[in-house]
Amino acid sequence: MGCAQLFAMKAPHNKDIMIIRKAADEMQNIITSILKTSQKESREDLVEIDLNQVLRDQIDLLRADQFFKHHIQTKIKLNPLPLYPGVYHHFSQSIGNLIKNAVEAMYDREKGVLSISSQKEGKAIIITISDTGDGISKTDMGKIFDPFFTTKPIVASDGHPTGTGLGLVSCKEMIESYGGKISVASEPGKGTTFTVRLPMK
């Protein structure tokens, strides 16, 4: 049992300790996943993945969310892609995190637009996820992949999205473990676009 769990048992209603525990649990999940990725040489978990289906699955998971249902318009353009060898949960976790972040970036909007596209470009697969949220400031742009950096509150009582600053770190690690790259473009007041580029092998 870790220190965070022990403290939480002794003071189950202490918000600061619960925040620490949440961050510790999430970091443990990330470490476990990264270690699993590093063991890919066994090839036991590799399957042929339909990345378009991963995108559809993650969108479907959001459809039950009331904010998504009533405030988010989707623009989806998924072009035919070759199957990609990998571990399914690596892509569902990383892509799901990007989509979730895009939706949460529009939380203060009465209406927002989530745009998702996929295409084969040369010897690479390109996935883009865009939102019409507040965008990312130049100051924050260089920090978004830093561990524990977040512009979201860690705790919120009004239903506002929260964060620990570990999601994008995990996403970047996953994409890069496949030789891929993730980039971001943003314009304050207009929105943000994340682009994932995966090499075809």
Image (spheres, rainbow, N blue to C red):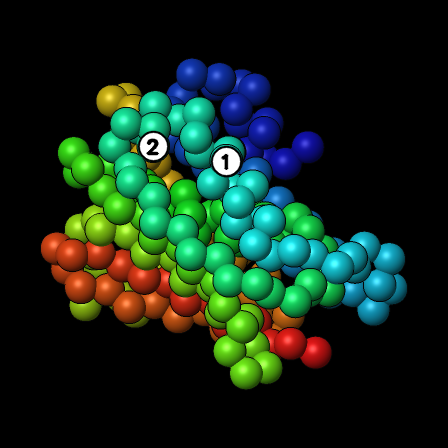
Q: In the depicted view, which residue is nearer to us: 67 or 90?
A: 67
Per the model, the C-alpha gap separating discs 2 and 1 is 11 Å
**Can residue 33 be seen?**
no
**Can you tell which quarter of the image residue 43 is in?**
bottom right
Q: Which of the two discs, 2 and 1, labels the residue nearer the N terminus?
A: 1
**Can residue 74 be seen?**
yes
Callout 2, which amino acid?
Answer: Phe
Callout 1, which amino acid?
Answer: Asp
Residue 99 location, x and y as percent? 42, 48
What secondary structure is marked by label 1? helix
* Residue holding disc 1: 60
Residue 190 location, x and y as percent? 16, 56
Residue 152 relative to residue 164: left or right? left
The answer to whether residue 90 is above or below residue 23 is below
Q: In the depicted view, which residue is nearer to us: 120 or 166?
A: 120
| Label 2 Cα crowd, 10 Å radius (few <14 / some 14-19 / many 20+) | many
Q: Residue at x 56, y 54 (%)?
A: 52
Q: Can you say which quadrant of the picture contains the C terminus?
A: bottom right
Q: In the depicted view, which residue is nearer to us: 152 or 199?
A: 199
